[in-house]
Image (tube, rainbow, N blue to C red):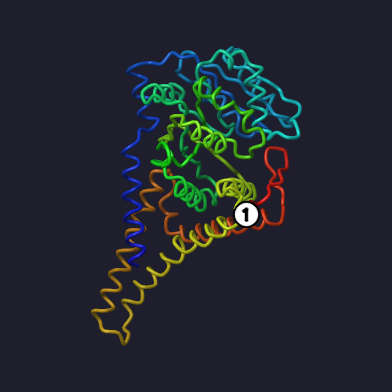
Amino acid sequence: AIVLLVYWSVGLARIHRSLKALPSARDGAASARERPCTEPVCVIVPAHNEAGVIGELVASLRQQTHPAVRFVLALDRCTDDTLKIVRELTEGDDRFEIIEIAECPEAWAGKVNAVWTAFRASDAAKNASHLICADADTIFDPELVAASCALVRDRQLDMLSYVSDLSARSWFEKIVQPACGVELLYQYPILRANGSGEHRRAFANGQFMLFTRDAYEKLGGHEAVSEAVLEDMALARIAADLDLRVGIFMSDRMLRVRMYDRWDAFRTGWKRIYIDCAKRKLSRLHRYAWRVRWIGTVLPACAFAGVLLSIIPTAAPEFVRWIAGGLCALGLCAWLLAMGYIYRRGGFPLWSVPLNPIANWLLGGLFSEAARDLESGRPVKWGGRSYLLEPR
């Protein structure tokens, strides 16, 4: 109970301090309205069989308020109706360019090749001072591009990325996904992601990454991470090595994403993310599995049991039962307050907070399964290709 109380009291304070210390996309939007940005921007969207989601993205891109933005849709080996949909939705809007990619070199990751091919082939990309790479399952607020440019200007950044707001439609999005997101931010604290030097914890979210042209060229573009399954983290690590100024901010509802619409895809996707974040180290994955189950499941369950036992007459002195029960109740309250704050900020239903211990137990299972996949040589299937990742 004491561990739970201290852990989540400190955790809640740190989360609140982090959010107060850094601007959000909303702050960037306010700045852009006061001092509009006019730099030419190119948004590149790699898409592999995204017919189910790309329509919402294109609709949101058409509403962008930035006066000098162009969009390049890089359709990577699509076999569904993605091309038909984007042609219909972009007809008559000369800000859009469609590039079809028929094949991917064996040594390249599909998404990385799509972005790099589009960057080299598009005049809009070549002439832009700011380059944005965004996933096809994102939805932009009308002011997002303008807000991002303002944040880069105001904070003199070389690279910017957001912690997006995730959808909550399916049961696993409402129950398990919040725990997955919390764990990712635990591994990559947002203040450290915005730090510099030895204190920086390199992080970026490939759902949305903005680069100044100079920074993109210094990084070597996506060609520098051609084999990376998680190109965002690979680029973030290079940026840290080059000591580029990187900003990681909360999107504050201005960038919405539906990552996975099926439970099997959800599990596969998050395993891929965690394997790369653990740098393919089996010991880390096993340690993460133990930690999330202990802190996220066992401690809250023990605190709840302690509260129940304190009201049941036993041989223990009454004052001992009340002190123990009070500590358990305080620990449980600290945990509930922290989870409620996180869920509310993330747009997740508050009724799913009491189910967080179940979510963390399932998350621990994902870590263990990721370790087994890595150890057994099971390929990672993603974006129409299979990748064999070897443990380190």
- The one nearer the camera, 178 or 168, is 178
Left or right for 82, reference 169: right
Residue 239, x across and y down, in percent: 51, 32
User: Tag 1: residue type?
Assistant: Ala
| SS at circle 1 | helix
Note whether 96 is above or below 82 in the view shown. Answer: above
Residue tagged 1: 370
Residue 100 spot, x, y in % from top left: 71, 22
Percent x, y for residue 50? Answer: 65, 33
- The residue that appears at 68% across and 49% down in the rendered structure is 390
- Is 223 located above or below residue 2 in the figure? above
The relative height of residue 377 versus residue 47 in the rendered view (above or below) is below
**Name of the residue lying farthest toward the left:** 319
Specify whether 118 is left or right of 133. right
Which corner quadrant holds the N terminus? bottom left
Q: Which image quadrant is residue 10 in?
A: bottom left
